[in-house]
Image: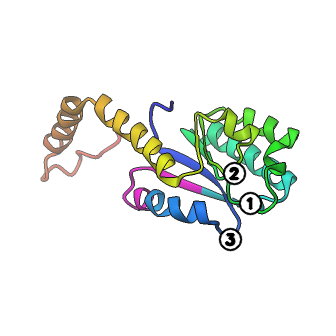
């Protein structure tokens, strides 16, 4: 389970899909509220090479930008589970370096089996994301955050022009 969910990479079907369209509004609301930064990577789910390359990009994003989890929409596809059963795609998913969540289809794929959480029901995936955020909130040191906020407000007099000076 991810300890926090400040950045989420979502690998989604190009042009949308019914499962993604059901889950996306909640994720986009959190993004707009600056709770979780959502990075969407659209890909043709019928093209294993494109999916593999997108998963490699997600791994780079995890490594360089510190994404906390990767969501893969494996269920919005027309041709069954062939793409997400491709050996190269599975290897790319294994190399992501962050917990996986999948919004699966009716038939689980190897990618769905690798995931920390996988469900064909958008509400279940939404609940898993809420669980992560709730855990993060419970672990927050509210007293420390309040002291930091108070120190920042009190530590800068309004009439002192040098209060922001870097020297």
Q: Quadrant of the C terminus?
A: top left
Q: Is residue 102 left or right of residue 1?
A: right
Q: Position of residue 61 (x, y in %)?
A: 65, 44
Q: Is residue 117 visible to us here?
A: yes
Label 2: state its secondary structure.
loop
Residue under label 2, please give it. 74
Of residues 30 and 101, the one drawn nearer to the viewer in this rendering: 101
Residue under label 1, please give it. 77
Q: Is residue 34 left or right of residue 69?
A: left
Image position of 16 with respect to 5: above or below: below
Label 3: state its secondary structure.
loop
Query: Residue at coordinates 52% horizontally, 63% vertically from top-left?
Result: 22
Query: Would residue 56 be counted in the magenta stretch?
Result: no
Q: CA distance from mark 2 to mark 3?
A: 14 Å
Disc number at residue 15?
3
Label 1: state its secondary structure.
loop
Q: Position of residue 70 (x, y in %)?
A: 61, 43
Outermost residue to the front: 106
* N-terminal-most mark, 1 or 3: 3
- Contact (Cβ within 8 Å) of mark 1 with mark 2: yes
Outermost residue to the bottom: 15
Q: Position of residue 154 (x, y in %)?
A: 13, 41
Query: Residue at coordinates 75% horizontally, 51% vertically from top-left?
Result: 54
Of residues 68 and 114, the one drawn nearer to the viewer in this rendering: 114
What's drawn in magenta, residue-wise? Answer: 29-39
Q: Quadrant of residue 39?
A: bottom right
Name the mark nearer the viewer: 1 or 3.
Answer: 1
């Amino acid at each position: 389970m991810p300890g926090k969910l400040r950045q989420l990479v979502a690998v989604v079907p190009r042009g949308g899909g019914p499962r993604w369209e059901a889950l996306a509004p909640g994720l986009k609301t959190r993004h707009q509220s600056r709770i979780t930064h959502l990075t969407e990577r659209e890909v043709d789910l019928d093209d294993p090479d494109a999916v593999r390359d997108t998963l490699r990009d997600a791994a780079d994003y995890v490594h360089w930008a510190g994404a906390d989890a990767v969501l893969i929409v494996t269920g919005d596809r027309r041709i069954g589970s062939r793409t997400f059963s491709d050996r190269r795609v599975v290897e790319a998913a294994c190399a992501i370096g962050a917990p996986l969540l999948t919004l699966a289809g009716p038939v689980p794929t190897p990618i769905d089996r690798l995931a920390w959480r996988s469900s064909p029901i958008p509400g279940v995936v939404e609940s898993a994301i809420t669980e992560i955020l709730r855990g993060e909130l419970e672990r927050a040191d509210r007293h420390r955050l309040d002291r930091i906020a108070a120190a920042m407000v009190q530590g800068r007099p309004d009439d002192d022009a040098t209060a922001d000076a870097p020297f």
